[in-house]
Image (cartoon, rainbow, N blue to C red):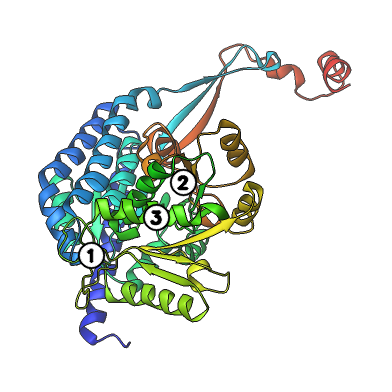
Amino acid sequence: MVATASQLQDEQHHIAHLENVFAKQKAAFAKNLYPSAKQRSDDLDKLAAALRKYKDELAAALHQDFSCRSKDETLLAEIMVTLEGIKYNKKNLKKWMKPSKRHVSALFAPASNQVLYQPKGVVGIIAPWNYPVQLSAAPLAAALAAGNRAVIKLSEFTPATNEVMQRMFAEAFDEDQVAVVLGEASVGAEFSSLHWDHLIFTGSTMVGRHVMSAAGKNLVPVTLELGGKSPCIITDNASLQGAAESIIFGKATNAGQTCIAPDYILCPEHMLGDVKTQIAQAYKKSYPTIKSNDDYTAIINDRQFNRLQGYLTDAKEKGAAIETLNHANEDFSGTRKIPLTLLSNTTDQMQVMQDEIFGPLLPIVTYKSLDEALTFVNERPRPLALYLFSHNSQEQDHVLKGTHAGGVAINDCLSHIAQDDMPFGGVGDSGIGHYHGKEGFLSLSHAKSIHKKGRINSGKFIYAPHGRLMHRLIYKFIVR
């Protein structure tokens, strides 16, 4: 599709705005290299107050952008989770800022060692469309707690939400501290190429590669929150009804458009029928109807909707068994709503088993032994999340030590992301680096090592000329 002259002009306007606020923030940071704990705490209060004030407008805007976005999902998964994270940052801020004392070897005494956590500077945040509030405000909270300034690039797929967020941030902060920029791919490319002091990107693995490549040209440190195919392992020792209810929560929230949504289920062969039955019952209980149910979110746009329909067509043509959980026998034409759809008899040749699904399609793969299930997981790129349903402690330990994943929840789905005292991040194809809580503060701070000596400097005993007594003692008793 060729851009019109008007579109090109808009993109150039957005790029000019980006470069302007970037320069403003660099200059402002140079004048205040180490904001006080009070200033940082006040900034976190501003962010929390803004989210509370605009929560209803944000929910309405997200509903407009998705054509149907559950208000409760917005309040719980975007607003509540972020507010709790801000509160945790504020509570622990002074403790995190305190210089860390470190050991001094007797060889270098008398002296002191400490690590000072210094703000990095200006942080770039690229937020996705699926949770635009949480995935811009949560990294912003980490940036502010660490004493940084930030520019947020919002997705072009959520224009109504972007308009509200622009007003919200502009009201709460001066542009030389927190700014929002808009625009499409060309703005995103320019954003990634700037000389940030740290860059946080949340999105697909494919785009993450481009972002990291662009950042690498300036040696900009990155935090990449990506995704992948997060497995959900059910064992014989699971409470199947509870497992099904948790899986429905994880998969149906935001209609599966969640980076840590369960992507597929692994279950013992003999449990396949029972797993399908329990999944269907749990889904019907939570969503008895879909079409006019405001609790059930729609797919964000036609592009994503058509992608998911393409997965179903491809899987059906290649022999998958497809079961659509349409309990009320509704006609979804004219909407972008897709009811939860179970797929079995899938193969690796199907797109649904190759790509991150990011929607309400749920393949169920069977295994003969738990080790076979772990092999299935380990032969694929490392996922952002892994879910295990088992009440057997030996099985839990075996899975935890026998797999890699960014994070794990046992006997639940999604809830690990809301644990403020734990880092959140991927591994391998699912991401690089962590944030949330203390790890967010550390990721966006430079740990400056400081070795301090007073008037007595023992180091002079090893200065040249060499061969003196201290050199001989070191060689005899330490180097040997």
Q: Position of residue 205 (x, y in %)?
A: 48, 62
Mark 1 highlights which residue?
158
Mark 3 highlights which residue?
277
Q: Residue at x 23, y 72 (%)?
A: 13
Q: Residue at x 59, y 35 (%)?
A: 397
Q: Answer whether residue 268 is visible to the viewer in this image.
A: no
Q: Position of residue 151 (x, y in %)?
A: 30, 53
Circle 1 packing at 10 Å, graded few (<14), some (14-19), many (20+), is many
CA distance for labels 3 and 1: 36 Å
Sequence-wise, the earlier of marks 3 and 1 is 1
- In the rendered structure, which amino acid carries the disc numbered 3? Thr
Q: Position of residue 294 (x, y in %)?
A: 16, 58
Q: Image check: 251 left or right of 381?
A: left
- In the rendered structure, which amino acid carries the disc numbered 1? Thr
Q: Quadrant of the C terminus?
A: top right
Label 2 near label 1: C-beta < 8 Å? no
Of residues 203 and 100, the one drawn nearer to the viewer in this rendering: 203
Circle 3 packing at 10 Å, graded few (<14), some (14-19), many (20+), is some
Q: Which mark is residue 425?
A: 2
Q: Image check: 75 left or right of 355?
A: left
CA distance for labels 1 and 2: 24 Å
Sequence-wise, the earlier of marks 2 and 3 is 3
Quadrant of the image occupied by residue 49: top left
